[in-house]
Structure formats: structure tokens, C-alpha cells
Image (cartoon, helix red, strand yellow):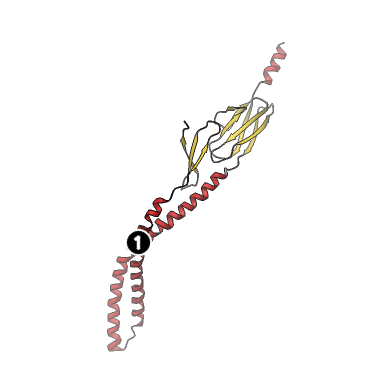
Amino acid sequence: MLFVLSVSLSAQDSTKVRFFINGGSSVFIKLDGEILPVSNFQNIVPGEHRIEVWSPTYKLYKSKITIPEKDSVGHYIELKPDPAFIDYQFAMDEHKQKIFMRRTAPLMLAGAGLVALPFLHVFRKNQHEILVQENFKSEYFRVSSESAESRYNTVNALYFGSIGAAVLGTGLYFALRNNVKSLKKPVYNQKNPFTLENFRISLNQINRAPEIGLQLSF
């Protein structure tokens, strides 16, 4: 009787399973309809089980798993990205390009023109004085002033170019301001199939990793 009882108890012992899941940082596992604690290590009774795995920005994984009667085993699962999240990434890239071309680029153009303008003004004034001196020497001492004239024309072109950049950049910024305000930032929502909570997910602009915000469903 004791021998049969010990054999029965040993058959109920669980196996330590380490899950290697290729997916997001937050992973939810459901085994035979029950949500397991959030961990890569799980104690599971040997035998066949129904398993479901989900991670934000990935598709729900469903399969069957057979756990052997061992002290510990490893199990690898690869999650497939949600096509809607891939579309969201492309939409975000397109949105950022529109923001850059319609707001950031005009501001950079205007800023570059305004920063360069005072330096070019001083430099242009100095080159003009040099040109006047060279023209005087050329008139009375037959010395060529082509080099000074060339430098002055170059500085002159840069000077008026900086004015044009400042005016054009400022004009474009104000002309496109309402258009930029009307742009809608793409949104990606996904529901946790286990808890039925809605996740609003955005991209971290520094490391390009998804950031999750929680919204409860009522």
C-alpha cells in the first residue's frame, strides 16, 4: 500500500520548465486555461497541456506541449510580430518625415540664416573695405584687384543667401504651421487576450523599443 502511494505521489511531481520565448520583454503564458505567474521558469505537471503565449506587439501563440517526467527541461517558443504593429511602425516613420519636412527643416533653414547673418555682415564690410583699397591701388598703381573683387562677390552672395534662407525658412514655417497641426499621430492599440485590457503602444524614439500604456476596458 505504501509503495503504491509513493508511486502515485511521484507521478504528480512537477517538472521545472524554462521557457525561451523569442518575443517582447513582457510575456503572458496561459496553460490549460489558467494564466501562469509572470516568469520564464514554471513548475508544470508532466503530460500534455494546451499552451497559449502572448506578448505586446506580437500575435497570440497557441499550441500543445508535452512535459516529460524530468527535474527540468527547456522549451523554445517563437512569437510572430503583429502585422498591425509593423504597419504602425511604417506610419510613424512617415509621420516623422512629414513633421521634419514641414516644421523642423524650415526652422533649421531660418535658424542657419539668422546665425550666419551677423558674421557675414561683418565679413562683408571688411571685404568691401579691402576691395575699395585694391581698386584704389589698381587705379593709381596698376595693381590687379580681381582677387579682392572675387572674394567680395563670394561673401556678398553668402550674405544675401543667408537673408534669403532666413526669410524662406520663416515663411515656410508659418505657411505650413496649420498643416502640421492637422497631422494626426498614428496610434496602435492591442488587447491582451488573457486579461482583456487594452494597450496603447508607442515607440521610444531613442532606442526604437515599444512603450506600453494601459487602458482599462469597462
Q: Is residue 208 left or right of residue 144?
A: right
Query: Percent x, y for residue 60?
Result: 59, 37
Query: Percent x, y for residue 99?
Result: 43, 54
Looking at the rendered structure, the number of numbered marks drawn on it comes to: 1
Give the camera-side residue of 126 and 158.
Answer: 158
Residue 130 occupies quadrant:
bottom left
Label 1 amino acid?
A: Gly
Residue at 46% from the left image edge and 52% from the top image edge:
96
Residue at 31% from the left image edge and 71% from the top image edge:
123
Q: Is residue 110 left or right of residue 7?
A: left
Residue at 70% from the left image edge and 11% from the top image edge:
2
Instruction: Assign a secondary structure to mark 1.
Output: helix
Please tell me whether residue 97 is drawn above or below residue 139 in the rendered image: above
Query: Percent x, y for residue 159?
Result: 33, 70
Give the camera-side residue of 37 and 3.
Answer: 37
Query: Percent x, y for residue 203?
Result: 48, 45
Q: Quadrant of the N terminus?
A: top right
Residue at 72% from the left image edge and 14% from the top image edge:
4
Residue 9 occupies quadrant:
top right
Dot 1, how many residues are within 10 Å of its Cα: few (below 14), some (14-19), or many (20+)?
some
Mark 1 — residue? 171
Please tell me whether residue 199 is drawn above or below residue 173 in the rendered image: above
Please tell me whether residue 51 is drawn above or below residue 161 in the rendered image: above
